[in-house]
Amino acid sequence: MELHKKTVKRDKVLDKGLLNNLWILVIIMLSSVYFKGESKNDFSTLIKIICATLALLISIIVYSKIPNIKNDFVKYIGIGFLYLGIINFIEIFLKATNISDNLQLKVSITISWFEFVIIIYSVILYKKKLGFLLSNIIFLGSLIILFILSEVMIEKKIIEYLSSEYGYVIIISIICLTIITIGLILRDKNIIYKEDKQWLVKITLFMPFYNIKNYLGIVLVTDISYLENICRVIVYWLAYRYVEKKLLSNSYRETLDKLIVIQKTRKSMNNSLMKKERRLRESRMNIKKSEQRYEEIIESISDGILIFENNILMYINENGREYVFHELTGEVIKKELKYILKLLTNVVIEDHKINEGFIKDFIIENKEKEKKNITLTLKNTSDTGKVLLISNITGLDELQQLRQKRDKAKDMETIKDEFYSNISHELRTPINVINSGLQLNNLMLNDNKLDKMIQNNNIIRRNCLRLIRTANNFIDTNRISEGFLEPNIKVYNIVGIVEAVVLACNKYMILMDNKLVFDTDLEEIYIACDKEHIERIMLNILSNSLKYGKVGGNIDVIIKSARRGVRIFVRNDAPPIPEEKKKIIFEKFTKLDSSLARASEGSGLGLYLAKKLVELNEGTIQMNSNVKSGNMFDIRFPFKFSGEPWEVKLDNNEQNLQEKVNIEFSDIYFN
């Protein structure tokens, strides 16, 4: 608990320090660009690019966390900022190409109005608790209406007239509207969280400064474009920080808390195991001392000893009596060997085995009805004499089980240590790369080296995708382990799903000179499945095939329809996977190459998730390999329908699928 408190306190301090430093850095950077005498248009374009990028980052974060978002207010902010980011980039494109100043003005006015609409609608929709699709329709429809309205007002010169004739009145009205809006926000009981209200107040305070520029230009002589752009960046940055803190930072802290609990549990288990091992060593030492001290005595009386002459019992020691005396009445001596064996084992033993002798294990019950494991050893001592030894091996079985548990615990410790090493590498490496890339961008921005900044941005984006992939794998693994991942079963054409994934992955195959071939015996094969799961399964297997394949190799994806279901084969001509790896390839944290100097990255969860997702869709997956054909994944799904809805026409969102592909292949190094 103390460690957890220190961690939370440290995170808060780091968040505040990072935010303050970033503010200073952004203002200094923008000020230097502005006051160096650079073109104001370039400065304004830079601001718009930053704002558009922040808007899309907000939407990406929200859309990736949609299933886990508990605060609907954040969801609506993310939906609105998706369209805001798109129209911002449209404005940048129009300005860069000089297509139409009139159209650019319409888009600019639409953006200014839509920013207010996002705040207002988010509060309204938060009360209504509308669905995801309907919310998108509302925001998109509002954006279209605002654009049409701006077009009408510009064509009719309404804005020009209001700006010239009623500038003071509009400014005062906007200020009053801002004050009223803040008051309503503070009094609104539907906005539960205090930070939501604080953020709305900040946004409402800053937004008017760059949205009334046309009217302030009438009143003021001084050029206020710099203040306008700074206020714009502040608004978008506040929105990004709000969403990032709500969805990402809290998620990372929860993961850290879980890791702390796991670490404490492991420490407790280690302590318990060490105590057991210490007691076991002490027991072994005592046994060894006893063996040395009483070796002769133990050899003679530790087991039940029965001596027979001409198959007639002549002698039995005390241990032997414990096994047979409670079943016998009267004198034990003079009983026949065959009768004693039947009494002990409840089994009739053949005469030839009695004559030749044997060693065999049995399970018997003593007079307290306790089951014991014993070994009967019958030996010929002479032509007429025999010795029957009764050895109790129950304790040995328990010791063997204890040893197996200890060995299993050691194996788990080895797996955990390797996992912590790998996950540390998986998280630290992309974060360091992103940090270094941002520092280089700052230097290159001052030197106006935009082409190198673009290269750095690609590296930063790739490592961001890598972090997203790692986080997604851990989140999905935890959801599967807890039983919270439920498939959304519908009837789909699985050929279309797999073909779309193959086509989307082909560009990465080309980078490694790999030839990706897709083949099917039927164009349409319908099964009941979860479309998202099928895409994830194929992405994991294809990225794994490319990751551990060879440069210039071949990867084949083949779909065949069988009598009871469909089979999907993914085959590559890479060196065959060793037999010892094939046994554990679908287990958690299994990697063919776990060294830190490997040619590709990964947490070792991809094939584990693929198998679990296949099983959630009532399918099976297995791995076959040999020297001639390489490695082949064999996936089978049954023809099993129970009234699921049919999706005859696939909704192929190529952009969404390509984003998934980019995330999945982000941990492979391409030259």
Image (spheres, rainbow, N blue to C red):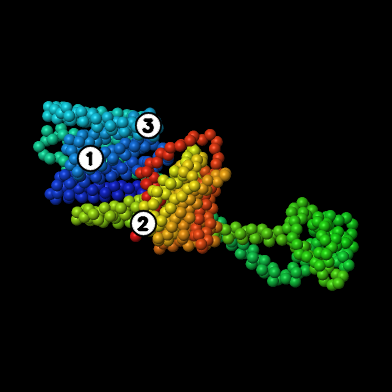
- The local crowd at label 3, few if under 14, some if 14 to 19, many if 20 or more residues have their Cα within 10 Å, is few
Camera-near label (2 vs 1) is 2
**Visible residue check, residue 467:** no
The amino acid type of the residue labelled 2 equals Leu
Q: Quadrant of residue 282?
A: bottom right
The circle on residue 91 is 1
- Give the residue drawn at x 77%, y 69%: 300
The amino acid type of the residue labelled 3 equals Leu
Q: Is residue 557 above or below residue 575?
A: above
The circle on residue 511 is 2
- Give the residue drawn at x 74%, y 68%: 298
The amino acid type of the residue labelled 1 equals Glu
Total numbered labels placed on residues in the image: 3
- In three-dimensional space, the C-alpha distance between marks 2 and 1, rounded to whole angstroms, equals 34 Å
Q: Is residue 404 above or below residue 540?
A: below
Nearest to N terminus: mark 3 or mark 2:
3
